[in-house]
Image: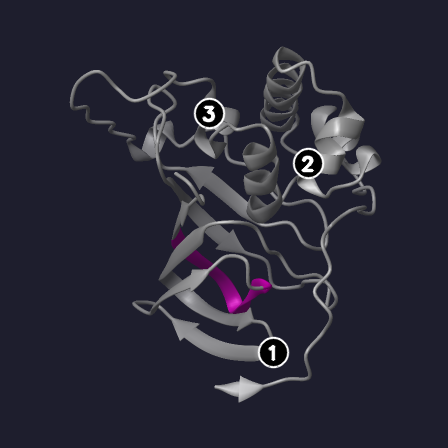
Amino acid sequence: MSTAQRAKPTRPKSAPAPARKVEASALDKLGARIQHCRSKQQLTLEGLAELSGLSKGYLSRIENGLQTPPLGTLIRIAGALNADVTSLINGEGTHGAPASPFVSIVRKTERSPVIRGASAFGYDYASLIGGNVTAKMEAFLFTFPSNIDKYVFFEHDGEEFLFILSGRVEWQIGHERHLLEAGDAVYFDARLPHRGRALDGEASALVVAHRAGG
């Protein structure tokens, strides 16, 4: 483990427009679901911006499928909307606690849509929990980018568990940097500023997030 000079955590209140629109159908559907959920609560973009701590312009680009929200940002939006991330990605699930015990199976061919990062702080991720249940946790297959903005960290309510499936990752929490390899795991308070990047090619991980109050 090596220690680097601490950078002031910054939240993605605004973001550069991507050079091109990627995964249009997945992004459009995600944006439409966020907009639908916001409208059902009679919440304006300004209201969502205030609750989430994100800028109105940034949220507008997400709703219009022009910006890929990183997982941490999507969790913050879901928290502001009192929704779960899985329902925003896969479609609305059931509301409230299930009436009876349930099982949700998502096969590898059903991990759609995959949200792919298009910005300097974008990460690729696919939900591993079906949209037919309201989950108390979120699970994702996560792919790290090789290049990240040196000033951008992510932070949100709740806790996260990260298990490296392949590759090598430089994982940073606050001012501390850790080298993680396949088989390594980390569990942390997601309110701490955090981020990661792939080393020596592609790296993937299982990420499980639990929202505060969930």
Residue 128 sits in quarter = top left
Q: Residue furthest bottom?
A: 2
Q: Residue 13 magenta-drawn?
A: no
Q: Earlier in the sequence, mark 2 or mark 3?
A: 2
Q: Residue at x 68, y 62 (%)?
A: 148
Circle 2 — which element? helix
**Where residue 56 sits in the image (x, y, percent)?**
81, 33
Start-end of magenta stretch: 193-206
Indicate whether 178 appears above or below 141.
below
Label 3 is placed on what type of residue? Ser
- Indicate left or right for 76 with 98 as reference: right
Residue 86 sits in quarter = top left
Q: Judge depth for marks 1 and 2 and give the one in front.
A: 2
* Residue identifier under label 3: 87
Circle 3 — which element? helix
**Where residue 162 sits in the image (x, y, percent)?**
39, 59
Q: Judge depth for marks 2 and 3 and give the one in front.
A: 2
Label 1 is placed on what type of residue? His
Task: Calculate the distance from the C-alpha at mark 3 to the C-alpha at mark 1.
Answer: 33 Å
* Residue identifier under label 1: 175
Indicate whether 52 appears above or below 72.
above
Q: Earlier in the sequence, mark 3 or mark 1?
A: 3
Q: Main secondary structure of the magenta part?
A: strand
Task: Calculate the distance from the C-alpha at mark 1 to the C-alpha at mark 2.
Answer: 27 Å
Task: Calculate the distance from the C-alpha at mark 2 to the C-alpha at mark 3.
Answer: 19 Å
Q: Residue furthest left?
A: 101
For the residues labelled 3 and 1, say whether their Cβ atoms are less than 8 Å apart: no
Q: Residues within 10 Å of mark 2 (few under 14, many from 20)?
A: some
- Looking at the rendered structure, the number of numbered marks drawn on it comes to 3
* Residue identifier under label 2: 51
